[in-house]
């Protein structure tokens, strides 16, 4: 598709010392399209030329030529503002969307690059809480977007299936297995056992000793310990799978922490060899105090492995298995220090520079609940499946009120309820804490998932009203030159650009915001323009635009993990 930014950058590059790529970085979108479609800030040249931005703008404007693509250049402040040919733009955008359909916006910029996206990673025998829900949604979306841009993408669920807590779980299971209904309600009952054994450990040091022993035995392959551990794992995975099925989330690898437990000797040996391993009260540590990162424990005094070491072993394994360009860890910001530590220690593992630079913690904020009648248990833990079910239930109620005659109510309610929750999890900058409030997430008119779905359904019903979708060859693009149409077209034009920014910043919220803007702009277009019109030529142009919006909204939402309903 035509790249106006490129055309403008080329023009400027021909007249200045700056190269095209650099100029492209500087080119901005003016705050208001009345001012122009693209702006070049001339102060970027001021230092080198020793002139004021205003003067540079005037001189540059004289030298730049207009053509069929760039129809006008204006100076505002120290900016050169460019106006592009909107008829060409409109034609290009609509044709490209028609040709590529749901592949519009995809490209092969990621060709020959491998990205690992590690996400979800809940802990076995513990509830799947809303923090894990958030990172599951964020990770799944990043995974899809990288794929869409041609990356070889691997989704990894780094299950928390190891650690001393399993020594405790095994002890509790051994003692009280018969008292609990583990088969039917595994996560709750195992949590109860865990709470009980923890309390006992606090009272009785000798029990704690037994628990530690259990974990050591597990690491050594003790039959009973392994059997219990496998059982806990199977039961938990079955539960987690329900959530993944609801969300439509899949992984390419389910290698959890336990997988790395027999691979840590190499890490320890390497660090020893590099002379950075120190003894500290019987434990082995790497001292990172001079970098302000505290101390990273590598091996405990009783010889047991530890979370950080398993992560280091995982890095080595992933380098060898995938030779990745990026390895993203979608994990809450509470673990910022942990990832800083392991990325620092990884520098001593002799891994290629490319992989080392590709390690990245995609840190996200907490989900906070507006208190009220959430499905809370014991005050704090929200069970994700219950939350999702409740969302679907509530969506169904809304449908019953608004559109009781609707077909396939259950199916549509599922898409709307889940869409609402998913959107809420990605709609803000991911590092920010997110508030969850039923009243806002399910609001059809707010900045929500259901709003995007609602606008999509509107495009769909418009398209269903006409007998025939017009052929683009017959479209008169002059009829799409009003402000509302142009805003929509410019949004559509920017779709690919937004996706590129998402992977550059690992920030799927950019796509979520984009879809809100596109929906709002389409809504304005719809309110200002009669689509079904006596004038067929006008109608055809507006239908063609509606079709394009329909395709991009659906594909954009699907990249966030949101399905579109057929009716609302
Ligand atoms: N299981 C951990 C938790 O729930 C998250 C694991 C994050 N990934 C990692 N490679 N350390 O807190």
Image (tube, grey):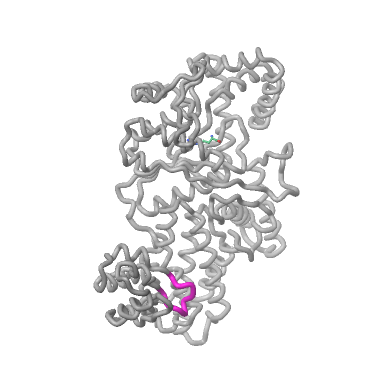
> Quick check: 505 left or right of 25?
right
In which quadrant of the rendered image does the C terminus lie? bottom right
Q: Position of residue 25 (x, y in %)?
A: 36, 63
Query: In this orientation, which residue lies closer to the viewer: 325 or 42?
Result: 42
> In this rendering, does residue 500 appear at all?
yes
Foreground residue among 281 and 150: 281
Identify the residue at the far right of this view. 372
Residue drawn at point x = 51 percent, y = 45 percent: 363
The quarter of the rendered structure image containing the N terminus is: bottom left
Can residue 475 be seen here? The reply is: no
**Residue at 32% across, 41% down:** 354
Magenta stretch bounds: 29-38
Where 294 falls versus 60 (above or below)?
Answer: above
Judge by depth and name the residue closer to the eye, 430 or 143.
Answer: 430
Residue 196 x, y percent position in the rendering: 70, 23
Tell which residue pokes out farthest to the bottom in this image.
Answer: 535
As for residue 132 lying within the magenta part, the answer is no
Q: Residue furthest front?
A: 50
The residue at 70%/51% (across/down) is: 370
Q: Position of residue 361 (x, y in %)?
A: 46, 42
Q: Is residue 35 magenta?
A: yes
Relative to 561, say whether 524 is above or below: below
Q: Main secondary structure of the magenta part?
A: loop
Quarter location, residue 381: top right
């Amino acid at each position: 598709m035509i790249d106006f930014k490129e055309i403008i950058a080329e023009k400027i590059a021909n007249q200045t010392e700056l190269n095209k790529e650099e100029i492209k970085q500087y080119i901005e979108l003016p705050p208001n399209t009345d001012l122009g479609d693209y702006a070049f800030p001339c102060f970027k040249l001021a230092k080198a030329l020793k002139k004021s931005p205003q003067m540079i703008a005037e001189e540059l404007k004289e030298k730049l030529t207009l053509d069929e693509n760039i129809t006008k250049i204006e100076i505002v402040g120290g900016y050169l503002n460019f106006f592009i040919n909107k008829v060409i733009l409109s034609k290009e955008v609509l044709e490209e969307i028609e040709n590529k359909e749901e592949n519009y916006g995809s490209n092969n910029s990621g060709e020959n690059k491998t990205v690992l996206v590690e996400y979800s990673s809940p802990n076995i025998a513990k509830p799947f809480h809303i923090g894990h829900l958030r990172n599951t949604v964020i990770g799944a979306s990043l995974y899809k977007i990288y794929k869409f841009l041609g990356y070889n993408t691997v989704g990894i669920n780094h299950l928390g299936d190891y650690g001393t807590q399993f020594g405790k779980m095994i002890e509790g299971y051994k003692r009280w297995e018969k008292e609990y209904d583990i088969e039917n309600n595994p996560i709750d009952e195992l949590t109860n056992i865990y709470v009980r054994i923890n309390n006992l450990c606090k009272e009785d040091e000798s029990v704690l000793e037994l628990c530690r022993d259990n974990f050591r035995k597990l690491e050594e392959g003790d039959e009973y310990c392994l059997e219990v551990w496998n059982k806990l794992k199977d039961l938990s995975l079955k539960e987690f799978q329900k959530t993944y099925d609801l969300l439509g989330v899949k992984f390419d690898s389910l290698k959890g922490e336990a997988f790395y437990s027999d691979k840590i000797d190499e890490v320890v040996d390497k660090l020893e060899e590099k002379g950075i391993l120190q003894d500290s009260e019987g434990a082995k540590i790497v001292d990172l105090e001079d970098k302000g990162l505290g101390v990273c424990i590598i091996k405990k005094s009783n010889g047991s492995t530890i979370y950080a070491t398993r992560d280091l072993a995982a890095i080595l394994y992933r380098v060898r298995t995938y030779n990745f360009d990026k390895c993203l860890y979608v994990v809450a910001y509470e673990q910022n220090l942990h990832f800083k530590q392991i990325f620092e220690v990884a520098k001593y593992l002799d891994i290629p520079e490319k992989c080392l630079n590709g390690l990245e913690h995609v840190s996200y904020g907490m989900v906070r609940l507006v208190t009220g009648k959430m499905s809370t248990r014991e005050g704090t833990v929200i069970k994700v499946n219950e939350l999702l079910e409740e969302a679907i239930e509530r969506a169904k109620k809304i449908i019953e009120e608004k559109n009781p005659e609707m077909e396939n109510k259950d199916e549509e309610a599922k898409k709307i309820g889940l869409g609402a929750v998913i959107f809420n999890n990605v709609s803000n900058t991911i590092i920010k804490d997110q508030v969850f409030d039923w009243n806002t997430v399910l609001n059809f008119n707010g900045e929500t998932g259901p709003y995007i779905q609602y606008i999509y359904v509107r495009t769909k019903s418009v398209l269903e009203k006409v007998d025939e979708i017009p052929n683009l060859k017959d479209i008169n693009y002059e009829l799409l030159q009003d402000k509302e149409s142009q805003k929509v077209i410019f949004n559509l034009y920017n779709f690919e650009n937004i996706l590129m920014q998402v992977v550059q910043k690992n920030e799927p919220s950019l796509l979520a915001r984009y879809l809100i803007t596109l929906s709002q702009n389409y809504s304005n277009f719809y309110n200002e323009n009669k689509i079904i019109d006596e004038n067929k030529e006008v109608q055809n142009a507006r239908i063609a635009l509606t079709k394009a919006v329909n395709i991009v909204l659906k594909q954009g939402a699907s990249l966030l993990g949101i399905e579109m309903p057929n009716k609302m």
